[in-house]
């Protein structure tokens, strides 16, 4: 698959039952999306053992052309048909395990990763609203939990997996809820369930850790102030989320912040004006969670990404990576749109059937 994906791709043909294989004449650029490295604590729905992450980074270094996000964007803007396919590594949110677990591995294999920071979370040390929901359902008592949404929703808590799935369902519903209403519901949840402070402390990167990571060769971008669903905001509110987070990051890192990641990242999460807002706020690139690779001529503010971190073996990771190159992006997006979650998100699920994009 690695060999064939360098020169060919698989594409569906309208009106034909079987897809066709054709040669490709331009390089493809894959942006990998991760969230955390480690298996303990927040976020509960996303676990990536350190050894597994190292295996993936070692594979990338040995078998792929690895670029920084800046280099990738430059090559997309200045295409060179003789260039080969390439990969960039990105992380969303800014969890502290990136400092403790990911940074030594990134340095060891010289992977120039980019971390998109949720500015308010770094400023305050508080985890985002959806992480608090997952924590609430992890510590809730009983086999069921009554949620004050949709005229009352009774969700099962019989196992760790059920608790994660129930939390994912709540988050999925609240993503489509106006911001003020979502905040009220979150406040009601925390009135019902007292969140243990020790489970919330030290989960996000500190500014000192961010600066140390930057000195070690890690790059940073913006992931808004508070990780809202931008489609639920007014244009003014969305531009504040994008612009103020950029200002805060630039003040603390003393360098321009040019790259942005949309929270949740599906088209319905971004809304009709978010892409233009990213450009107006001065971002040279913005990444989504739409599955697929990028090629020259791509819109720099709707770049696609792929999440493969849950692949458990090197062989599985390698196969999925090169299949992402081999299959045409639109075909890949269609093939992963149906997951094991029962129609609650419309997104590609993780290994455990929970949200893959946030």
Image (cartoon, rainbow, N blue to C red):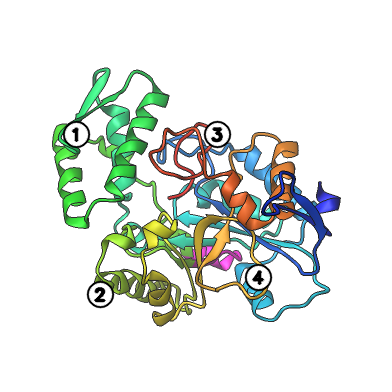
Q: Nearer the viewer, mark 1 or mark 3?
A: 3
Q: Which residues are magenta?
A: 211-220
| Residue at the disc numbered 2 | 236
Measure how far apart labels 1 and 3 are at the Cα level.
29 Å
Q: Residues within 10 Å of mark 2 (few under 14, many from 20)?
A: few
Residue positioned 72% across, 63% down in the render: 86
Measure how far apart labels 2 and 4 are at the Cα level.
31 Å
Choose top left, top right, bottom left or bottom right for residue 140.
Answer: top left
Choose top left, top right, bottom left or bottom right for residue 22.
Answer: bottom right
Asked whether disc 3 touches disc 4, contact meaning CB atoms under 8 Å apart, the reply is: no
| Residue at the disc numbered 3 | 351
- Name the spot of residue 193 as percent of width and height, x first: 19, 32
- Name the spot of residue 186 as percent of width and height, x first: 20, 44
Q: Earlier in the sequence, mark 4 or mark 1?
A: 4
Measure how far apart labels 2 and 3 are at the Cα level.
37 Å
**Secondary element at tag 4:** helix
| Residue at the disc numbered 1 | 194
**Secondary element at tag 2:** helix
Measure how far apart labels 3 and 4 are at the Cα level.
28 Å
Q: Earlier in the sequence, mark 1 or mark 3?
A: 1
Q: Which mark is residue 72?
A: 4
Q: Is residue 298 left or right of residue 188?
A: right
Q: Earlier in the sequence, mark 3 or mark 4?
A: 4
Q: Nearer the viewer, mark 2 or mark 4?
A: 2
**Secondary element at tag 3:** loop
Q: Earlier in the sequence, mark 2 or mark 4?
A: 4
Measure how far apart labels 4 and 1 are at the Cα level.
45 Å
- Name the spot of residue 172 as percent of width and height, x first: 34, 43
The extreme front residue here reads 15
Q: Nearer the viewer, mark 4 or mark 1?
A: 4
Q: Residues within 10 Å of mark 3 (few under 14, many from 20)?
A: some
């Amino acid at each position: 698959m690695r060999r064939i994906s360098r020169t060919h791709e698989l594409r569906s043909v309208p009106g034909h039952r079987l897809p066709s294989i054709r040669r490709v004449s331009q390089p493809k650029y894959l942006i990998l999306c991760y969230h955390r490295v480690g298996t303990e604590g927040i976020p509960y729905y996303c676990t990536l053992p350190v050894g597994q992450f190292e295996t993936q980074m070692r594979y990338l270094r040995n078998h792929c052309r690895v670029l920084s996000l800046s280099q990738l964007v430059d090559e997309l803007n200045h295409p060179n048909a003789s260039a080969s396919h390439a990969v960039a590594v990105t992380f969303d949110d800014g969890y502290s395990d990136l400092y403790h677990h990911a940074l030594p591995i990134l340095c060891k294999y010289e992977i120039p990763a980019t971390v998109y920071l949720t500015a308010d979370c770094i400023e305050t040390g508080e985890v985002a609203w959806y992480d608090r929901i997952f924590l609430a359902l992890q510590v809730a008592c009983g086999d069921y939990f009554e949620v004050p949404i949709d005229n009352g929703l009774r969700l099962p808590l019989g196992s760790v997996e059920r608790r994660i799935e129930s939390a994912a369902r709540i988050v999925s519903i609240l993503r489509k809820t106006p911001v003020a209403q979502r905040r009220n519901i979150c406040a009601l949840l925390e009135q019902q369930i007292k969140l243990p402070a020790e489970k919330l402390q030290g989960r996000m990167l500190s500014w000192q850790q961010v600066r140390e990571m930057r000195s070690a060769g890690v790059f940073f971008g913006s992931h808004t102030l508070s990780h809202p669903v931008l489609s639920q905001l007014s244009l003014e509110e969305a531009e504040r989320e994008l612009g103020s987070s950029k200002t805060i990051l630039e003040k603390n890192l003393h360098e321009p912040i040019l790259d942005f990641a949309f929270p949740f990242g599906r088209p319905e999460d971004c809304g009709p004006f978010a892409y233009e807002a990213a450009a107006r706020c001065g971002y040279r690139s913005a990444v989504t969670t739409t599955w697929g690779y990028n090629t020259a001529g791509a819109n720099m503010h709707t770049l696609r990404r792929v999440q493969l971190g849950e692949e458990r073996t090197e062989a599985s990771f390698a196969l999925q990576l090169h299949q992402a190159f081999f299959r045409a992006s639109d075909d890949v997006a269609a093939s992963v749109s149906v997951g094991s979650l029962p129609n609650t998100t419309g997104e590609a699920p993780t290994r455990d059937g929970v949200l893959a994009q946030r």
